[in-house]
């Protein structure tokens, strides 16, 4: 390492001497390369000035004293730059360490919160959930009950990043501890509300919609805790309707009862659940209208559910210049005979 | 030049006197121009801390010689409020003066050895050494 630096120092002097005589571009290119090597070897700006002073002294033993003093002055001015540079290097290393720590957390989250779409005949389900940053504050989970019912949870922690992600793990394990197929959506929300109220910082809010589909009766039961309303697509009429939802956000009051709704689903009907990362997509400074989400869904309605949600996501990802502002989760359930 | 000299820091002007004394001693000891400038910058940081955060204090210099090497010892002693969280002030990126000061991590980098002790309500002692190379 030191040998390389010594070589560079010698090279610097040669280039300087040549440049003073010829003012050629080649020497300037040469010093650019030397400078890069200095940076690589953590040579500080004041050391380069010092090297320059030394080289000048060797080339011109009787150099004007005023010029020499001015160079010493310049060296003094560079000391703080050198310090600032070293600080930036340390901060850069720290940032790198933080980033890799977060990516470990993100892959751990994927494992912890992982869920697979249940395979049920007569039901086509597609879901996509993409975090705005590395960690996801949205959550969805499927549960296949022993009675053939399908439970679908979707939640959104208000806020993003690490706090939201930590909170999600708690919600998941709370749900896991319930005998879902024996509990109705409204009971699950009532219980979760108590867990959140007791364990989560009051400044943190969680919205959730919990639904249960009974294939034998083609019936969807659901309850919502202040979650973004989903949509029901009536295939016979070709229309979308907003799903009726009413319910307090989780964790606000210790004892909250939730209202449960029922929806009968026919062939090719769809139920759409989403988080506000979908409905609050932005086109420049403008928030998109709900209408636009439904129009995009309509555009891809002929596709299987998974391709449908993926294409809708791609549409809004592009609209937002590939920079999501909020976690994006979209789930579509379609009944097929 | 006595082998042990101090400069009291009460007003901003005293920072310059401290720098000057530090530089003169460094020069006589045979430090390179770059190291002289580094020592002067470290003096500035320590003296400015005293001027800004402690009522009164002083910067002391001492020539330090062993058989193998010689160096300059520099200490900053004040009777100010003390530092609550030393780990925090020793962190890069932490500064109370708006981000432009090199701060104590800067002093640590400029010098070869660095030690700090602080008592709340009694003051702070910082001892540093720079070796002649």
Image: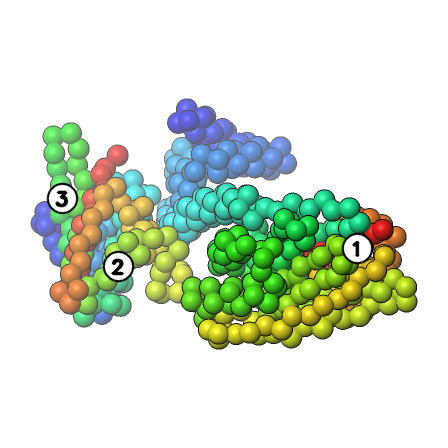
Chain of residue at mark 1: A
Residue at 21% in and 58% down: B18
A104 to the left or right of B45 = right
Position of residue A156 relative to residue B3, above or below, is: below
Q: Residues within 10 Å of mark 1 (few under 14, many from 20)?
A: many
The residue that mark 1 highlights is: A334
State which quarter of the image contains the N terminus of chain A. Answer: top left
Residue A280, which numbered label? none
In terms of depth relative to the viewer, which is nearer, A70 or B12? B12
Q: Residues within 10 Å of mark 2 (few under 14, many from 20)?
A: few
Q: Residues within 10 Å of mark 3 (few under 14, many from 20)?
A: some
Q: What is the secondary structure assignment of the residue under circle 2?
A: loop
In terms of depth relative to the viewer, which is nearer, A288 or B95? A288
In the current view of this chain or complex, which residue is farthest to the right?
A237
The location of residue A124, given as percent across then percent down, is 78, 50
Residue B63, which numbered label? 3
Residue B85, which numbered label? 2
In terms of depth relative to the viewer, which is nearer, A286 or A249? A249
């Amino acid at each position: 390492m030191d040998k390389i630096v010594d070589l560079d120092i010698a090279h610097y002097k040669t280039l300087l001497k040549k440049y003073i005589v010829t003012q050629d571009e080649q020497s300037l290119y040469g010093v650019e390369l030397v400078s890069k090597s200095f940076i690589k070897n953590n040579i500080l700006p004041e050391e380069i000035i010092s090297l320059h002073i030394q080289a000048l002294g060797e080339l011109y033993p009787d150099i004007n004293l005023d010029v020499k003093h001015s160079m010493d002055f310049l060296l003094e001015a560079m000391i703080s730059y050198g310090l600032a540079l070293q600080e930036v290097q340390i901060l850069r290393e720290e940032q790198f360490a933080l980033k890799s720590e977060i990516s470990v957390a993100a892959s751990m989250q994927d494992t912890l919160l992982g869920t697979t779409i249940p395979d049920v005949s007569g039901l086509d389900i597609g879901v996509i959930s993409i975090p705005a940053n590395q960690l996801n504050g949205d959550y969805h989970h499927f549960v296949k009950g022993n009675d053939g019912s399908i439970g679908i949870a979707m939640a959104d922690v208000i806020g993003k990043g690490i706090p939201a992600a930590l909170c999600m793990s708690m919600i998941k394990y709370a749900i896991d501890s319930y005998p879902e197929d024996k509990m109705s959506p409204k009971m699950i929300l009532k219980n979760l509300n108590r867990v959140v109220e007791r364990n989560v910082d009051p400044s943190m809010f969680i919205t959730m919609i919990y639904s249960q589909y009974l294939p034998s009766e083609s019936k969807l039961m659901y309850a919502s805790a202040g979650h973004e309303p989903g949509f029901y697509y009536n295939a016979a009429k070709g229309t979308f309707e907003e799903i009726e939802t009413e319910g307090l956000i989780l964790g606000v009051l210790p004892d909250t009862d939730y209202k449960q709704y029922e929806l009968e689903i026919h062939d090719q009907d769809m139920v759409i659940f989403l988080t506000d990362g979908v409905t609050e997509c932005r086109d420049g400074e403008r928030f998109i209208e709900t209408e636009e989400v439904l129009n995009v869904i309509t555009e891809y309605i002929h596709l299987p559910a998974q391709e449908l949600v993926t294409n809708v996501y791609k549409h809004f990802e592009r609209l937002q210049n590939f920079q999501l502002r909020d976690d994006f989760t979209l789930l579509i359930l379609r009944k097929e005979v | 030049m006595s082998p042990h000299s101090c400069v009291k820091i009460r007003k901003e002007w005293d920072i310059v006197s401290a720098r000057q004394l530090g530089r003169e001693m460094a020069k006589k000891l045979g430090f390179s121009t770059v190291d002289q400038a580094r020592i002067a910058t470290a003096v500035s940081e320590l003296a400015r801390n005293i001027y800004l955060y402690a009522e009164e204090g002083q910067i002391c210099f001492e020539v330090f010689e062993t058989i193998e090497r010689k160096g300059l010892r520099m200490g900053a002693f004040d009777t100010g409020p003390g530092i609550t969280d030393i780990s925090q002030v020793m962190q890069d990126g932490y500064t109370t003066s708006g981000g432009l000061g090199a701060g104590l991590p800067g002093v640590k980098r400029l010098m070869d050895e660095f030690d700090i002790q602080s008592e709340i309500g009694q003051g702070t002692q910082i001892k540093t050494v720079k070796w002649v190379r």
